[in-house]
Amino acid sequence: MLYSGSLLKMNTQLKSTVEYELPIGNQLVELNQFLGKYVKFKWNNDIYCIICGRKTNKSFAQGHCYPCFISRPEVSECILRPELCEAHKGRARDMEWAENNCLQLHYVYLAVSSNYKVGVTRSSQIPTRWIDQGASYAIKIAETPNRYLSGLIEVKLKKYISDRTAWQKMLKNEILENFDIEEKKEELASYFDLNLKQFISRDNTITKINYPVIEFPSKVKSIGFDKNYIIEGRIMGIKGQYIMFDDNTVLNIRKHNGYDVEFNA
């Protein structure tokens, strides 16, 4: 089976085992069916902006051309640093977009991918955000009416816990042992400033996420199309936005948004 077109990050569905779809051009490839099978990616040396479709020599912020990178709301500074969001003050690159994305219910969450980490996401992105980061467990810490307030809480909590995923440990499935995620949430909630305590979430539901993996790599070697026009091997697993092959190499699909490829399976 041959598929061709520009890559986009994998779509996911949370079931007993996460189900993955790989968008290639206008096609959706159900990836779980290829677990344990040989596949081949070939990059055609072209990159197309995932917003405007313009051909670009370099990908900015995972799939954008430079004009979109410096102007589009999807790549505003507050996407990576929500505490800098000013949409609640009526200031944004695009206020209509901000109303639909920044001025919506947001969650501060606690996840376990290897160790504990905190993060922020829009309510509509749960559980997608957790899956994209390769979390095995996640729980909501706080609920806020906009991105800015979630960002303030995250900044406070980062003094006590990381906001980054140790991606190599995550891919090797080296998960924290003997943890209590609900107890950790209570500890973090105790650090909230008085004016932010009202946003503590009462929802203590713990989401457990299982990924389609035959065998986790013992070592991890990241590969990409910029240095390897052809990437091939037997798929041993899929976790986060990574495809894991039988030679311990891993391919970050999200990093290659907009890359024009052929996929043969």
Image (cartoon, rainbow, N blue to C red):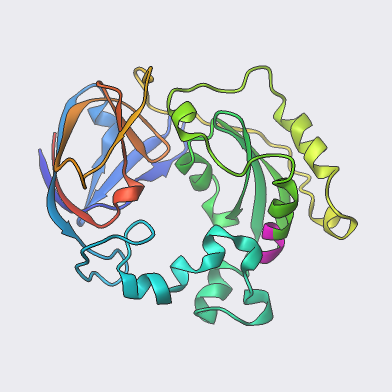
Residue 18 in percent (x, y) is at 42, 34
Residue 146 seen from this side: no
Q: Indicate left or right for 89 with 136 as reference.
A: right
Residue 182 falls left or right of residue 113: right
- Tell me: 201 left or right of 221: right
- Residue 41 pos. (x, y %): 16, 40
Q: Which picture quadrant has residue 117?
A: top right
Quick one: which residue is furthest to the right in this view?
A: 194
| Residue at the extreme front of the image, as rendered | 227
Q: Main secondary structure of the magenta part?
A: helix
Instruction: Quadrant for residue 216, please give it.
Output: top left
What are the residue bounds of the magenta stretch? 146-151
106 over 250 or under it: above or below: below
| Residue drawn at x 28%, y 72% as measured from the top left | 52
Q: Residue, x 41% and y 77% (percent of image)? A: 71
Would residue 189 be found to the left or right of residue 115 on screen? Answer: right
Residue 189 magenta-highlighted: no
Residue 100 lies, with reference to residue 258, above or below; the image says below
Please name the residue shown 47% across and 38% down the image. Answer: 14
